[in-house]
């Protein structure tokens, strides 16, 4: 943490009257966890603090302390626009480009508030924020927020609510500490968070053990009927059409983790999940080792992200998306042959 950045941040926090916390579209555990962790921390200062997200979070995160404070543009448009226009300090969490926040982008760009980026994705756009905390080696934005709080000298303000939220962000973005982004300091940070006394077992239960019957059936269908294995068992993909999602009453977050299940097959080095949604095919890429799925996402599917975990999209029908994926895979495997061995 650069001391000048920390000092600048603290000065802006103390001077602010209206602080807004934003995060990327299609929220996940890290974007919600980091938002609520920062929210509970900043509430201990004198400013009015609110959270404004582009869209709703999946139901499996609604249990989190303070979740009712998360406003979203989809269902609370007038309120979010008003909060954004009156903000004098805006936090941009877990995204490296303003385009990642969907329709909320125009209100972010229009705002004259000071903007602070806290993010861990590759190739950050430094232009739209005044203060930038970017570390692509960090396992999560939640971990970065913890480090910022420590560097600012406010460790004693990490209470159980802050700890619960940050732990949720860390545990979800590390795949329960199994991804290569998990470093020794990650475990040290978690140990410190646990010293606050929050119920870490409950966090795991709420995230991983509260599935609806429809979600279990959808997962079973996806693995049994829609899983495909290519390239001598090294690559797998799962695709779900809009009709298939409707068949199982799929809600937000119900396909979370499918791509990791496809990656978890013995011998598989890379996995892709494709989901149809109103003419857009949303894609998730995962890999083992140092296979750069971020390159495929950015070069071919209008996306990007981390080396081993990225997202992208394809405009059109799902069959054409699969055809494009299958067509470019041979060259991708050839270019990264040593990494697949």
Image: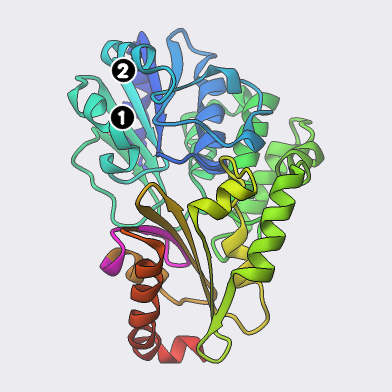
Of 77 and 205, which appears nearest the observer? 77
Left or right: 176 in relation to 6: right
| Secondary element type, mark 2 | helix
Identify the magenta region: 299-313
| Secondary element type, mark 1 | helix
Q: Which residue is mark 1?
A: 104
Above or below — where is 120 with respect to 74? below
x 66%, y 76%: residue? 265
Q: Residue 264, located in which quarter of the rendered image? A: bottom right
Left or right: 258 in relation to 82: right
Residue 92 is situated, as x and y percent measured from the top left of the image, at 36, 34
Tell me if residue 53 is in the magenta stretch. no
Q: Would you call the spot at circle 2 few (<14 residues within 10 Å), some (14-19), or many (20 or more)?
A: many
Q: Is residue 313 visible?
A: yes
Q: Sequence-wise, which precedes: disc 2 or disc 1?
A: 2
Residue 72 is situated, as x and y percent measured from the top left of the image, at 44, 24
x 57%, y 55%: residue? 244
Q: Would you call the spot at circle 1 few (<14 residues within 10 Å), some (14-19), or many (20 or more)?
A: many
Above or below — where is 302 with respect to 164? below
Tell me if residue 311 is in the magenta stretch. yes
Q: Which residue is mark 2?
A: 84
Give how far apart the Cα atoms at labels 2 and 1 are: 9 Å
Describe the colour scheme in one phrase. Answer: rainbow
């Amino acid at each position: 943490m650069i001391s000048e950045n920390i000092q600048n941040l603290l000065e802006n926090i103390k001077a602010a009257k209206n602080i807004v916390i934003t995060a990327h579209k299609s929220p996940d555990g890290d974007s919600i966890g980091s938002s609520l962790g920062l929210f509970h921390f900043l509430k201990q200062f004198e400013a009015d603090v609110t959270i404004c997200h582009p869209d709703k979070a999946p139901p499996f995160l609604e249990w989190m302390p303070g979740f009712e404070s998360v406003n979203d543009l989809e269902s609370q448009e007038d309120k979010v626009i008003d909060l954004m226009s009156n903000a004098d300090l805006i936090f941009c969490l877990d995204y490296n480009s303003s385009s990642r926040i969907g329709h909320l982008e125009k209100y972010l760009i229009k705002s004259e508030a000071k903007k602070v980026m806290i993010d861990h994705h590759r190739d950050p756009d430094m232009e739209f924020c005044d203060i930038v905390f970017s570390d692509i080696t960090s396992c999560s934005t939640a971990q970065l927020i913890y480090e910022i709080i420590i560097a600012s000298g406010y460790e004693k303000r990490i209470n159980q609510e802050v700890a619960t939220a940050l732990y949720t962000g860390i545990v979800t973005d590390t795949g329960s500490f199994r991804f290569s982004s998990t470093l020794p300091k990650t475990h040290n940070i978690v140990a410190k968070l646990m010293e606050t006394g929050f119920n870490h077992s409950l966090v795991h239960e709420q995230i991983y053990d509260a599935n609806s019957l429809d979600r279990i059936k959808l997962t079973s269908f996806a693995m049994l009927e829609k899983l495909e294995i290519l390239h001598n068992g090294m690559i797998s993909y799962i695709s779900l059409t809009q009709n298939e999602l409707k068949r199982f009453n799929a809600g937000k977050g119900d396909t979370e983790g499918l791509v990791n299940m496809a990656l978890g097959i013995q011998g598989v080095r890379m996995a892709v999940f494709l989901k149809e949604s109103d003419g857009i095919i949303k894609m998730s890429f995962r890999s083992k080792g140092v296979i750069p799925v971020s390159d495929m996402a950015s070069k071919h599917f209008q996306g990007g992200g981390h080396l081993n975990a990225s997202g992208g999209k394809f405009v059109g029908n799902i069959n054409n998306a699969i055809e494009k994926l299958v067509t470019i895979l041979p060259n991708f495997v050839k270019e990264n042959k040593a990494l697949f061995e």
